[in-house]
Image (spheres, rainbow, N blue to C red):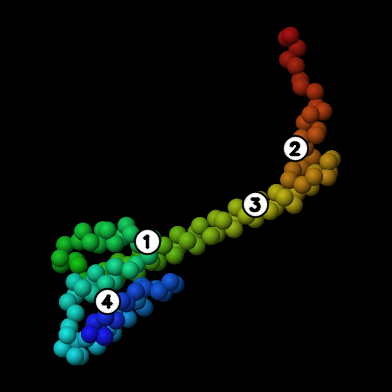
Amino acid sequence: MQLFSEFLACKILPGENISLFAVKLLRLQEKLKGINNPIDEDYMCFQLLKYLPSRYGSIVQSILRCNDDKFKFNEIQLELVAEESRLQVRASDNNEEHIETHSISSSRKSLVCFHCNRSGHFRNKCPELQKKVPSVSSGFD
């Protein structure tokens, strides 16, 4: 009963990757098989999917719609590892974009106007000078 309870309580830990979580489930399955209480593959699949973080929601939904011949532990694990990699790439892309945006805004703050000595613009874009420049008329008034 203790091993079966461990299996049912087995969750993916924060920061843990899919492969490591799958190995934990497989080890518990082997222990249960060793005492003549094997776990059905469907239960293995559901346990693998059950406690995933919400960011895996869409892939879990598509996996649950799979045919029985595709609903295999190894196949699901491969799909989840691929999704994990995709999410990591997306997160690093977003992080790089954030860093780039931050560096651009930081560099704008370091700009100093030679006219008013304020940061954020050059002299040719100085609001004080823009006010002083008379508007050019077309001469057809």
Categorize mark 2 by other alpha carbons within 10 Å: few (<14), some (14-19), many (20+). Answer: few
Classify the position of the N terminus by image quarter.
bottom left
> Disc 3, disc 1: CB below 8 Å?
no
Q: Secondary structure at mark 4?
A: helix
- Tell me where residue 4 appears, x and y as whole percent: 24, 82
Is residue 52 visible to the viewer in this orientation of the structure? Answer: yes
Farthest residue to the front: give it.
1
Q: What residue is pinned by disc 4?
A: 8
Of labels 3 and 1, earlier in sequence is 1
Type of amino acid at the residue the image marks with label 1: Ser
**Label 2 sits on residue:** 125
Cα gap from disc 1 to disc 2, whole angstroms? 47 Å
Which quarter of the figure has residue 54?
bottom left
* Residue 125 percent coordinates (x, y): 75, 37
Between discs 1 and 4, the one toward the N terminus: 4
Crowding at label 4, few (<14), some or many (≥20) Cα neighbours within 10 Å? Answer: some
Image disc number at residue 78: none
Residue tagged by mark 3? 104
Which is more toward the observer, 35 or 24? 35
- Residue 58 to residue 34: above or below: above
Disc assigned to residue 54: 1
Callout 2 touching callout 4 (CB < 8 Å): no
Mark 1 vs mark 2, foreground winner is: 1
Residues at circles 3 and 4 in contact by the CB criterion of under 8 Å: no
Kind of residue at badge 3: Ile
Would residue 94 appear left or right of 101 to someone viewing this image?
A: left
Considering only order in the chain, which callout, 2 or 1, is on the residue closer to the N terminus?
1
Measured in 3D between alpha carbons, the distance from the residue under mark 2 to the one under mark 3, in whole angstroms, is 17 Å
What separation in Å lies between label 2 and label 4 (alpha carbons)?
A: 65 Å
Label located before the other in sequence (3 or 4): 4
Give the mark toward the camera: 3 or 1: 1
